[in-house]
Image (cartoon, rainbow, N blue to C red):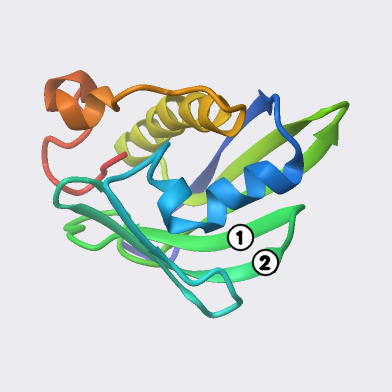
Amino acid sequence: MTPTTERFSVVREVSIAASPETVWRFLVDPAKAVRWMGVAASLDASPGGAYRVEVLPGDVVLGEFLEVSPPRRLVHTWGWETSFGSVPPGSTTVAFDLVPNGDGTLLRVTHAGLPRGTAEDRHARGWEHYLPRLAAVAAGDDPGDDPWIERPDARMGASQEGDDRC
């Protein structure tokens, strides 16, 4: 990848029927985090701390926490451990902004630094899949089994070459 490669952001918002404090816990507590995304997580939610989530069996995201401002803003780097392409570990940034909204929270996710094309599309699809699961579990509902884990064919082409997962 050359330094002149254009980078793009995926921005998604979801309203969650839970306080920012409750939503925050689902972003930083490994046991709570895997209830909406992933099969295993190791999260050291402090600046410089490690971010590691096995999103799907064998597909691991690695990063580092950059900003930890409970319960309003969380920023960490993101990239695929087994990446052969455009999204290596730490090469992109994910920011969660939690905005109080009545009795609930407006959660804005900005995934920045993605290369245009397949990586951008797949990560957009990934956030569209996982954010409703976060909204459900944070509100006290059961999001059910993740169909992307239970049925890999349900991922809509999420990893054909092994480089642009999500």
The residue that appears at 52% across and 33% down in the rendered structure is 134
Mark 1 vs 2, N-terminal side:
2
Q: Circle 1 sits in a helix, a strand or a loop, which is it?
A: strand
Whether residue 51 appears in this view of the structure is yes
Quarter placement of the C terminus: top left
Visible in this render: residue 114? no
**1 or 2: mark nearer the eye:** 2
* SS for callout 2: strand
Instruction: Rate crowding at label 2 as few (under 14), some (14 to 19) or many (20 or more) other CA atoms within 10 Å.
Output: some
Residue under pointer 2 = 68
Task: Name the residue nearer the viewer: 144 or 109.
Answer: 144
15 lies above or below 115: above
- Tell me where residue 160 sits by quadrant: top left
Rendered position, 109 above or below 48: above
107 to the left or right of 35: right
Q: Position of residue 102 (x, y in %)?
A: 88, 26
Quote the CA–CA distance across marks 1 and 2. Answer: 7 Å
Query: Which residue position is annotated with label 1?
Result: 75
Tell me if label 1 and label 2 are in contact, CB under 8 Å: yes
- Please, is residue 67 above or below residue 70 in the view? below
x, y (%) of residue 89? 33, 65
At x 73% / y 60%, what residue is drawn? 70
Task: Name the residue type under label 2.
Answer: Val
In this view, which residue lies farthest toward the right? 102
